[in-house]
Amino acid sequence: MLKCLALFPLLLFLWALPSPPPQAAPPPATPAAFKVPPEIAQKTNPVKPTPEGLEHARKMYGYDCAMCHGANGDGKGDLAADMKLNLRNYRDPAALKGMTDGELFYIIQKGKDQMPPEGDRAKEEDIWNLVSVIRSFSQQ
């Protein structure tokens, strides 16, 4: 008990020492302009859609994309609403006007802004089928 009482003044002294000032957070990095490499942007979808390939891509879309982009591509998924994101409505043909298959492929594969990439989780053929699924929303 006496040993504990002997440590009390030391603990009180350490507690009373001023703490170092908080470190200022570094300024956020300014994101570089998003640019799809021209050799990819020029690509057209090389994968001929099959019922099996499209069904697999729809499942992938349901698992990975619908939470933000909406089950039917309207951009009103639950997570998008929670994060207050304003996403394109792929049901509107104007939403993808001027956007090449290669650009869509690149965005799905590499991600963009807050959208995470599919990266190596998906085969190239699956990503191309996702491009076909996304384009199909405006045709429904």
Image (cartoon, rainbow, N blue to C red):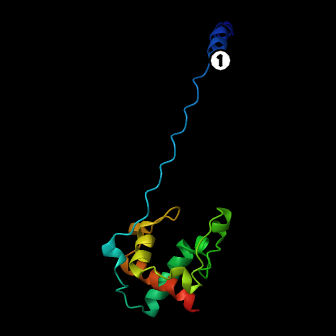
In percent of width and height, residue 118 lies at 44, 69
Q: Which residue: 65% across, 17% down?
A: 15
Query: Does 118 sit above or below residue 23?
Result: below
In percent of width and height, residue 17 lies at 62, 15
The quarter of the picture where residue 117 lies is bottom left
Q: Which residue: 41% across, 66% down?
A: 110
Q: Residue furthest left?
A: 39
The quarter of the picture where residue 6 lies is top right
For the C terminus, give its image quadrant. Answer: bottom right
Per the image, label 1 sits on a secondary structure element best described as: helix
Query: Does 102 sit above or below residue 48?
Result: above
101 or 14: nearer the eye? 101
**Residue 94 relative to residue 52: left or right:** right
**Which kind of residue does numbered mark 1 sit on?**
Trp
In percent of width and height, residue 71 lies at 61, 79
93 or 61: nearer the eye? 93
Q: How busy is the neighbourhood of tag 1: few (under 14 within 10 Å), some, or many (20 plus)?
A: few
